[in-house]
Amino acid sequence: MTAITITERAAKRIAEIMTGEPPGSMLRISVEGGGCSGFQYNFNVDSSRAEDDRVFEKDGAGVLVDEMSLQYMDGSVIDFVDDLIGQSFKIENPHATASCGCGVSFTI
């Protein structure tokens, strides 16, 4: 079973973001080629769901991931961090062998 885990901090932040979006909107996370390490994560708000999307939910906060991206993200944990550098979603990906300093791009 393919799975992505959403932490409580991430779910809370996603819920906060969605309060200003149209009803039914979710955070979409996709993987694309590029970035300084080969692949990069894209974060968008989306109110439409494609046929190949998988939905992962925690505490009412939803994340959409398309089937192609899911093969690179299976087993990942989505967290939200607020530190001296700033606020951001952080993905702990068990498939990534390396990532850039900002954590947005990675290598498999």
Image: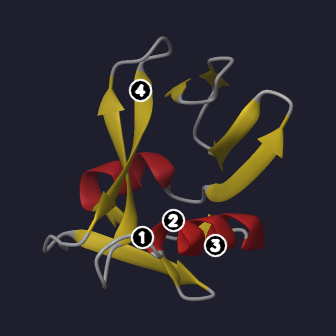
Q: Which residue is mark 2?
A: 17
Q: Which residue is mark 4?
A: 39
> Type of residue at label 3?
Ala
Secondary structure state at the residue bearing disc 2: helix
**Residue 4 image-quadrant placement:** bottom right
Q: Which residue is mark 3?
A: 11
Given this view, does label 1 or label 3 mark the residue nearer the observer? 1
> Is residue 107 visible in the rendered structure shown here?
no
Q: Which mark is first along the chain, 4 or 1?
A: 1
- The span from disc 2 to disc 3 (Cα, nearest Å) is 10 Å
Residue in the foreground of this view, choosing between 94 and 48? 48
> Where is residue 107 shown, x and y percent of the image?
52, 23
Q: Which residue is mark 1?
A: 20
Given this view, does label 4 or label 3 mark the residue nearer the observer? 3
Q: Which mark is first along the chain, 3 or 2?
A: 3
Tell me the residue at 60%/55% (across/down): 76
Residue 59 to residue 37: above or below:
below
- The span from disc 2 to disc 1 (Cα, nearest Å) is 6 Å
- The span from disc 4 to disc 2 (Cα, nearest Å) is 25 Å
- Graded by Cα atoms within 10 Å as few (under 14), some (14 to 19) or many (20 or more), the crowding at tag 2 reads some
Given this view, does label 2 or label 1 mark the residue nearer the observer? 1
Tell me the residue at 66%/58% (across/down): 77
> Type of residue at label 4?
Phe
- The span from disc 1 to disc 3 (Cα, nearest Å) is 15 Å
Residue 22 to residue 101: above or below:
below
- The span from disc 4 to disc 3 (Cα, nearest Å) is 24 Å
Residue 3 to residue 33: above or below:
below
> Type of residue at label 1?
Gly
